[in-house]
Amino acid sequence: MATATQAPDARKRERSLIINKLCKEYRAGQPVLRDVSLEIESRGLIAIIGPSGTGKSTLIRCINRLVEPTSGEILFRGRDMVALSGPELRTIRRHIGMIFQEYNLVERLSVIENVLCGRLGYVPVWRAWLRKFRAADIEHAFQLLDAVGLGDFANQRADQLSGGQRQRVGIARALMQEPDLVLADEPTSSLDPKTSVEIMELIASRAAERKIPTIVNMHNVDLARRFADRIIGMSKGAIVFDGPPLALKDSHLLEIYGGEGWLE
Amino acid sequence: MTAEISAGRPRQWQRFSLPERIMRSAFYLLVVIAVIWSLRTIEIIPEFLYDAPQQTVDLFVRMWPIDWSWYPKVVHPALMETLHTATLGTILAVAVASVVSLMVARNITRSIIVNTIGRFILVATRSVHAMVWALFFVALFGPGALAGMLAIAVHSIGFIGKFLAEAIEDAKPGPIEALVATGASPLAVLIKGYWPQVKPAFLAIATFRWDINVRESAVLGLVGGGGLGMALDTALNNLYWDQVGLVLVVIFAVVIVAEIATAWIRSSIL
């Protein structure tokens, strides 16, 4: 909220992300990410494509430090994420929304409470514990549920929803953070083709409406072409393509995925 | 078809190899030796067994008719004391065990030293029987319900803490990761991420342990822990068999009621 009063270029700077020579080794000598450098400007939907196990998930989890980078720099809101810890790290994390492949809702909580969990980085613990969320937060949560088409489901338990509905709750929870960056890790990989398109439409439209830069990992090249403003292709832990969807040619896909029988 | 292909020698199949068979035979032999050895050690005197059926019948005859008039005076207050002992003991144990289970659960506490300290507390409390704890607390605080309650509480910590820690470790990591990503503090993650996942197990464990504790506290009076056991002890010492019968019937009834109550609570949680 405080950011609304700042100059537009300050806001722009807050929403940009710069990754410098990021490396990650889960086991010494076996790098999953090799010197990844990336600059994400202040808006747009960026799709990261690449085969399974190529480090897409690790890259996006390094950004909000769910995974500890081995070396490198991640600059966001003027801070190096890699150097932060404790309360400072949590304060930055609350500006980064995240959407997961398996939705990761707290299943025994109601839909509205799952959305309100997006405020956990802002509200004091006792408020969360006693379910005394601020009236403005509750109103915002209801608005978001309406926006993702689940207005009538607020008091249902999350485990009663279908996959597509759960992902909508996941999106609402991420937006509840009023994020300056949204990370989505394979948000449609557990969904059927029709629901996948609907979910991508929702993510893309919210990102555009609120001008939030959004990074989406995905398997589906067609979905990436259809929704992304920019596509990043990864192979073996390194970036091998970076450009607009129209520039992505079969030769690039060959380099990203290998083989060619599937490129019909 | 396959038989034709491998014509010549029929193929052999045996479930166990020769060394395995020798090991198995040795194991059975060991069991027989252990049984014989144990029987010789406890020195059963056959003469005492011959009139056991008669003694049993005798005991029941002496208990009959049950002295119901003794119930309002002595047994009812003792029964209430037993239930209160079990309930308070369980609540105290749940409170302590909750903290210890957080120390033990490896997804919460990443320090092996703290894990080990917690695990030691669980093993130490559980491996000493409630009767022995009761003897200890009777020596400390004198006989009565307080000693019984503490014995119940301390002995239950290990049981509750162990199962609670397992329930916490079984919590799905996905929702936890999601809450961490929102910038939630560790305490908020505990309350909103772990607690909803652990709650059903928590209630099931607590009620189940209460059920066990009702049974245990009913006999703790034998060593001075108060409650029904105290009444039983008095009746036995006075050889008032009709009163002994009454206490046994009451214990039996309470155990059944506790069993039904906890089964009902568990089925309505899950």
Image (cartoon, rainbow, N blue to C red):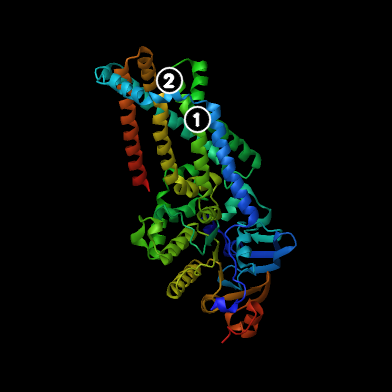
| Position of residue A71 measured from the top left corner of the image (x, y, whole percent) | 72, 59
The answer to whether residue A176 is visible is yes
Which residue is most to the right? A29
Which residue is most to the top? B238
Labels 2, 1: one chain: yes
User: What residue is drawn where x is 35% and y is 55%?
Assistant: A155
**Chain name for mark 2:** B
What residue does disc 1 label? B155
| Position of residue B206 measured from the top left corner of the image (x, y, whole percent) | 43, 38
Amino acid type, residue under disc 1 in the picture? His
What residue does disc 2 label? B222
User: What residue is drawn where x is 41% and y is 20%?
Assistant: B226
Contact? badges 2 and 1 (CB < 8 Å): no
Q: Which one is nearer the viewer's eye here, B131 or A31?
A: B131
Q: Which one is nearer the viewer's eye here, A238 or A8?
A: A238
Marks 2, 1: nearer the viewer: 2
Secondary structure beneath dot 1 equals helix
